[in-house]
Image (spheres, rainbow, N blue to C red):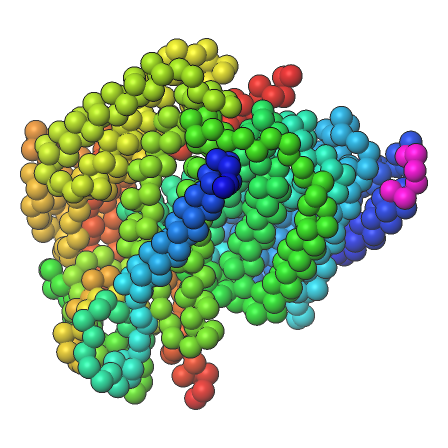
Amino acid sequence: MIFNYIGNYSLIISVIISLIIIFLSISSLQKINIQIKINLNKLIFFQFFFVLVSFFSLIILFILSEFANITVFNNSHTTKPLFYKISGTWGNHEGSLLLWLLILTFFIFLYFLNSKSRSIKERLLTLIFQEVIIIGFLIFLLKTSNPFNQVFPIPEQGLGLNPILQDPILAIHPPVLYLGYVSTSIIFSSSLGALIQGNVNSLWAKHIKKWILISWIFLTIGILLGSIWAYYELGWGGFWFWDPVENISLMPWLSLTALLHCILVLEKRSLLSSWTIVLSISTFTLSVCGTFLVRSGILNSVHTFANDPERGLFILIFLFILVFLSLVIYFLYEEKLKSNNNNFNLFSKESSILINNWFVMYFLSVILIGTIYPIFLEVLSSQKISVGPPFFNKLIIPFLIPFLIFMSIGPNLDWIKNKNFRKKIQLIIFFILNLILSFTIIKIFGKITLTSTILLAASFYLFFVTFKDLIKKSFKNNSQVISHFGFSLLILSIIMNSILSKEIVTNLKVGEQINFLENTISFKKIESSSESNFKSLVGYFEIDSKNNKKFLFKPEIRIYNQPKVITSEADIKTNFFKDRFLVINLVKGGNYFNVRYQEKPLMIWIWLSTILIAIGGSINFLKRYEK
Amino acid sequence: MYGRKVKLRILFLIVLLSSIILTIFLVLKSLEENVVYFLSPTEVKNLNELTQDKIRIGGMVKKDSININSDKINFIITDFNNEINVVYSGLIPNLFQESKGVVAEGFLKDKNYFNAEKILAKHDENYMPPNIKEQIGEK
């Protein structure tokens, strides 16, 4: 009980500290010679500390299963394993917002420690913007979704956590994703601070790039984790469904990726400064927008759990104020963004970065339209529609071709103007070779379409170009090459995976068997057992492949008791060439089981290549930190 | 006349503008083609002509209507006013149960028969298609 009060009052104290910090920062901004640093450092630390206390109180409430607390009551149950009691803390709306806030205060604390090289005014301005965001979220938390609300009379038992969230990967997926989302707020605040001070130059670029990298690395890993989870837990056997919630995590990532590249141009050539600011603002807006759309329940998606219009409205208003303020600041101080040279040569690194930036913006707008158009249409005409994968595939895949080509050529060009003609010819010959190679591959596997041939060629092109660079350069200067190499591997595995995947869906009884390609799938038996919070049915399947290899699959069905939900746990056999994926579902009565067997080539390379992309970013980050 | 730089800039602007227009056109065009409308059984009954497009039908699975054999499954979607027969073969989500909400995606054979290609899994045991929710709310 006591933790309820501790948690609640710590949050209120944090609001007060926020107000004090803003007041102190503004008053010290007006002094001409700022020498005192007051005790801002300490105040920021205390704010972080109080939010931390509040967060730990909530964790303790969850561990003790104190059902007097409404969040615990709604999302926990005494029979739940301890690990999921703890992860349940951020598996719900209120707790996840508290986590968001915790990271927000932690990052401003980190920023303040690590920004001593910047001018005091810029740091103070950044701090003010950051505190405005913190206050916004604190009020949002306290007013519409206080995790420390109480229920009376105290219930005997909780309602339990949604079983599909009871999964080790999903326990760490939200924190990682949030680390990515929230660090974009630092980029946002700092870019506004630098804009007002007229400091948007190559030094600032160097400084903020660390934060961009942090955010980008965590977002990449966070999206990857979510994708892996969807692959094995949802039982559809895919890794990306163009589901609105997936799109919403991809949009800030795209914007951030564009920012990551144009900050390079700003650093090396002092160009694109206003574009950088616009991207910083849009990245953060998209992150908050993500929270708004997921939490308001507007989106019709597998992930929407809570529905509360009031919450949605609050975030919408808050978001509107933030965007409005930042745009006002942008237009007021825009003239400070003078860049003296506007010379772009077509064959230079900066042009190819800029062109790919536009491509990324195009992908971003396609996803944005596909995601929010159904919402608008429903509001305007009350027609309910959904935009499916064909829309995204059709509009994105063809444009990946020039994107990949620029991605291969760009890094091999020089800044300002390229003079090396030999290299150019080399690159062209390389491309023709790859076109032939991929045509042969597609021909062997049968399905020839023009787009897939050229797309395959373009990704092979990037693959070989980056592979060549990978061998030539030393490990330390390889961050960009590793990421690009990872990206080519990702696209290659996705193409091969989508062309060569095979599946069968059927209904089977125990003892029956079925032939699929050169495999025989036989359903041997079913065994049931009981765990603390679910009953489990394990099916035994034997698959004889053509070369007399036998695989034993044990897919599982779990029937949870609180809440009463059935989930399927797929059994997946992974090797470097392909995944074999088998999942069963209960159908009425229980005589028949719905069986889905899939062979998915190169599946593991989709995960590995994404990790490679993130590793590239991490190497760059570490290199910068050493300096 | 104008210098080379100005000419270049005008050319650049024209290219930029036309590519933006082209993009918007392309996006709207494929949006139109790939949108899937969501209907209730009553709305299907009230259609003037049978649509050839892919649609989604949402409602409740009628009690005692599920029929299953080795390669396909039959069931009835109802919104308590009208019903529609659904034939489906493929993956059945766990939350697909009688008297629970369901969304099926596919093509209409006629106003009473629906060939489903996909049954959408909703990972919330309390999920109900929005139209059913409205109706229950009204009752």
State whether residue A313 is above or below residue A482: below
Q: In this view of the protein, which residue sits in the foreground, A504 or A78?
A: A504
Q: Report the label total.
A: 0
The x, y position of residue A128, in whole percent, is: 78, 46
Residue in the picture at 28% in, 32% down: A458
Q: Quadrant of residue A47?
A: top right
Image position of A618 (left or right of A20)? left
Q: Quadrant of the N terminus of chain A?
A: bottom right
Magenta-colored span: A29-34
Task: Tell me what residue is drawn at x 66 percent, y 58 percent.
Answer: A324
Question: Magenta stretch containing residue A30, yes or no?
Answer: yes
Is any part of residue A17 visible from this angle? Answer: no
Closer to us: B38 or B92: B38
Let me know if residue A410 appears in the view.
yes
Q: Main secondary structure of the magenta part?
A: loop
- The residue shown at (33%, 14%) is A422
Residue A4 shown left or right of residue A296 in the figure: right
Percent across and percent down for residue A510 are 14, 53
**Above or below for A458 versus B50:** above
Q: Dividing the image into 4 quarters, which one contains the C terminus of chain A?
A: top right
* Residue A427 position (above or below residue A6): above
Magenta includes A491? no
Location of residue A496 (image quadrant):
top left
Residue A286 x %, y %: 54, 51
Q: Nearer the viewer, residue A507 or A273?
A: A273
For image coordinates 28% across by 55% down, the residue present is: A390
Q: Position of residue B5 (x, y in %)?
A: 51, 36
